[in-house]
Amino acid sequence: MKISVIYHSETGNTRRMAELITSAAAAAAPGVEARFFAAEGVDRSFLEESRAVIIGCPTYQGSLSWQIKRFIDAPGVELAGKLGGCFASQNWPGGGGADFAEMTIIAGMLVLGMLVYSGGITQGQPFLHFGAVSARSPEGIYEERCIKLGENIARKAIELFGQD
Ligand SMILES: Cc1cc2nc3c(=O)[nH]c(=O)nc-3n(C[C@H](O)[C@H](O)[C@H](O)COP(=O)(O)O)c2cc1C
């Protein structure tokens, strides 16, 4: 079971989220091989073989960064049928726009024919709602949310697709 985590990051916050999500996904179940890639350096064959794709970005002007929008507009690989999850970093604990960034990523995933999942409030705390969100660096509750997202996506991917 391969899982790709794709991110854009300029100052490292979103990259750290990607690292946490990737290691949590890999640890969630035996046989999961998770890797993370900057959006401009994706291993296309690994992405092609991935059953789940988790996409994250910093919040720019209350929405997703243009670098991740560009990736969603032209992923270069057929993503239809893959399981999608999302994460976003913002500067302020409340109201910075990360939720809107995540909903815009989710909209793109739906248009591409992906299945979307976070676990929401159904998999215990910390709750995720749309995906993992952090304010600046992912520490404490923000770190826990990243770990939760990686675990939830890995487990759901295995439930949907088997060990594959
Ligand atoms: C052009 C630009 C626009 C931004 N707009 C927002 C915003 O609307 N809301 C917010 O909370 N943070 C905003 N930020 C802050 C970043 O989202 C935040 O610092 C994020 O953690 C950066 O992630 P990175 O370290 O992965 O690059 C903005 C930053 C930049 C550079």
Image (spheres, grey):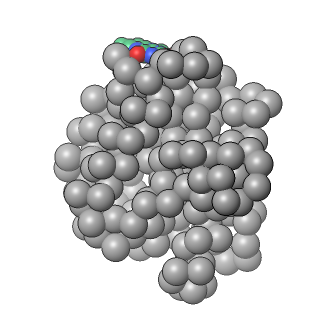
Q: Is residue 57 visible?
A: no
Q: Is residue 102 visible?
A: yes
Residue 55 placement, left or right of 107: right
Q: Nearer the viewer, residue 21 or 110?
A: 110
Q: Position of residue 10 (x, y in %)?
A: 46, 22
Q: Residue furthest left?
A: 74
Q: Quadrant of residue 105?
A: top left
Residue located at (50% from left, 19% from top) = 95
Q: Residue at x 72, y 37 (%)?
A: 143
Q: What is the count of numbered marks?
A: 0
Q: Residue at x 75, y 28 (%)?
A: 139
Quadrant of res 70? top left
Residue 68, position as x, y percentages in the image: 33, 37
Q: x, y percentage for residue 30?
A: 73, 76
Q: Position of residue 4 (x, y in %)?
A: 49, 58
Would you say 72 lies left or right of 103 here? left
Q: Quadrant of the N terminus?
A: bottom right
Q: Quadrant of the C terminus?
A: bottom right
Residue ID at (47%, 29%): 98
Up/down of 34 relative to 15, above or below: below
